[in-house]
Image (cartoon, grey):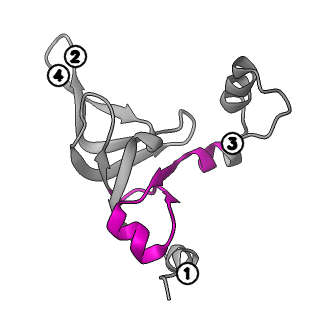
Amino acid sequence: MVRIESSQPRKQRKARYNAPSHMKSKFLNAPLSAALRETYSKKTVRVIKGDTVRVTRGDNVGDEGLVDAIDTRKVKIIVHGVSSTKVDGTEVPRPVDASKVEITKLKLDDKRRVEKLGEKE
């Protein structure tokens, strides 16, 4: 979270909306599933493209899919299979907040990510 002195919600929101891009990237953390939490002894991890997530809040609760894209500007993720229908009947992907999903399977292609996670001893 962006560190500011005020505890007023309006100033907290303003700091979040106006945060620089390197800080907005840190808002894209999502909680791990119980099995992964036990394996890696971490509660949250940064979501990346290729992770498998389950939606835990909203209209699409329970839907599971791969992360297709990440929008760091809007601080949202696009999950495969989570979409909304427009008035003309076309399906469009629905952006989901990273805190409203649970990571069920990690993409471990990146050596640095594996190193940072580090399995429990």
| Above or below, comparing residue 103 to residue 96 in the picture | below
Q: Nearer the viewer, residue 57 or 96?
A: 57
Q: Which residue is mark 4?
A: 90
Q: Amino acid at mark 4?
A: Thr
| Above or below, comparing residue 114 to residue 91 in the picture | below
Q: Which residue is mark 3?
A: 1
Q: Element type at marker 1?
A: helix
How far is the residue under mark 4 from the one under mark 2? 5 Å
How many numbered tags mark residues here? 4
How far is the residue under mark 3 from the one under mark 1? 24 Å
Q: Amino acid at mark 3?
A: Met
Q: Amino acid at mark 1?
A: Glu
Residue depth check, mark 3 versus mark 1: number of the one nearer the observer = 3
Residue depth check, mark 1 versus mark 4: number of the one nearer the observer = 1
How far is the residue under mark 1 from the one under mark 4? 42 Å
Which span is picked out in magenta? Answer: 24-52
Q: Element type at marker 4?
A: loop
